[in-house]
Amino acid sequence: MSAASTPAKTRDKAVKNLAGFLSSDSENILPDLEMAKLWKGIFYCFWMSDKPLVQQALAGELAELILTITDVPSSLNFLRGFWTMTVREWNGIDRLRMDKYYMLVRKFVNASFRLLVRTNWDSATVEEYNSILSGPNGPLCPNDIRVPASLAFHLSEIYLEELEKALTSSESPPPAPLSTLLSPFIALAARTPTNTTYKHIQSSLFEPLRNSLKSLSGPPSRKKARTSSSNYSELLVNVCASSSDSDQAMNVDAVRKSILQKIFDVASETETRDANRRRMYAFYKDAVEDDEDEDSAG
């Protein structure tokens, strides 16, 4: 595959042919070994793309394959191959190339959300998507020490931003099941053995989201300053807790309480590490006390 250096027309044809090949038959999904070989080639094709415009175009075209493949199981299989490859190769990416792989990850996260929107947040599809992220070879797998922490950090920083973009770029999208979509991060926060990973997930994802939900459901808390750079206002007007609730958007306060309850419930599980359990309980308690302070002030 020479898409890294070929003209756009030739590259588009190659990508189209690849989409057709991967769409051949949902009952004959490409085996794991063959998918790994395919992604090995794609990875180094992207590695060799040096010009910024070529990088952006190729990243976009590769991510769009998730949507141009004609059946959802094959799309998810292609996505699983992407994450398996990314986890395997991540630590070998040099500093000068890292930004373009961050961009590639961002494109795939966005395209994945648009695929889920297309399925109307079908519960089985969302659960399969979550299992790709959290399962073996996934970027949020909590019990695989081979998974690079910086990859989980990057995902926690861009996840809600790309979800918001995916919703705003779709026509009349159904409400996003926010609590369900956060499940891989909550599980990783509970079970990671790394203190920095927990802290990064809380500071870059849980806290900004809690603050945004709180600010949209009532006056800002006097207890803590709101530090989020985005309040995700376009996202949070069209969310629910889970796929079973996706017929209509829920009140943001109800969604916030659902997410906090999920954090509390996962913290209570036996698989949760003791140090992380204490932090998650503290996060939950802080949010509840924040509510109580505002109620008493009101």
Image (cartoon, rainbow, N blue to C red):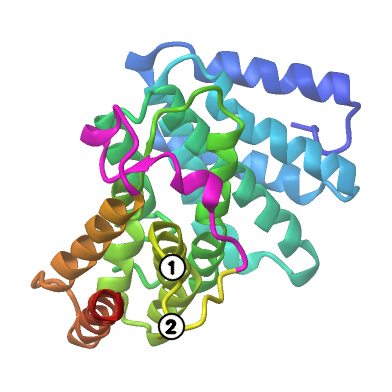
228 to 289, vertically: above or below: above
Residue 98: image location, x then y, percent? 72, 63
Q: Which of 142 and 44 is in front in this view?
A: 142
Q: Residues within 10 Å of mark 2 (few under 14, many from 20)?
A: few
**What secondary structure prevails in the magenta region?**
loop
Q: Distance between the residues labelled 1 and 2?
A: 9 Å
Give the image location of residue 284, x and y in percent: 24, 76
Percent x, y of residue 44: 71, 47
Q: Quadrant of the C terminus?
A: bottom left
Residue 136 visible somewhere in the drawing: no
Out of 153 and 9, give the one closest to the viewer.
153
Q: What residue type is labelled 1?
A: Pro
Q: Please report the bounds of the magenta region as a residue range.
A: 229-251
Q: In this view, does 60 lie above or below 218?
A: above
Q: Residue 141 vs residue 18: left or right?
A: left
Badge 1 density bin: few <14, some 14–19, many ≥20, Cα 10 Å: few
> Would residue 241 be counted in the magenta stretch?
yes
Q: Quadrant of the N terminus?
A: top right
Q: Helix, strand, or loop for circle 1?
A: loop
Residue 212 lies, with reference to residue 66, above or below; the image says below
Find numbered disc 2 in the image and state the secondary structure of the residue it sits on: loop
**Drawn side of residue 40 relative to residue 211, left or right:** right
Q: Which residue is drawn at 73% across and 68% down?
A: 94
Q: What residue type is labelled 2?
A: Arg
Q: Are marks 1 and 2 in contact (CB under 8 Å)?
A: no
Can the viewer see residue 48? Answer: yes
Look at mark 1 in the image and give the residue it sits on: 219
Residue 232 highlighted magenta (yes or no): yes
Q: Position of residue 174 (x, y in %)?
A: 40, 28
Q: Name the residue under label 2.
A: 222
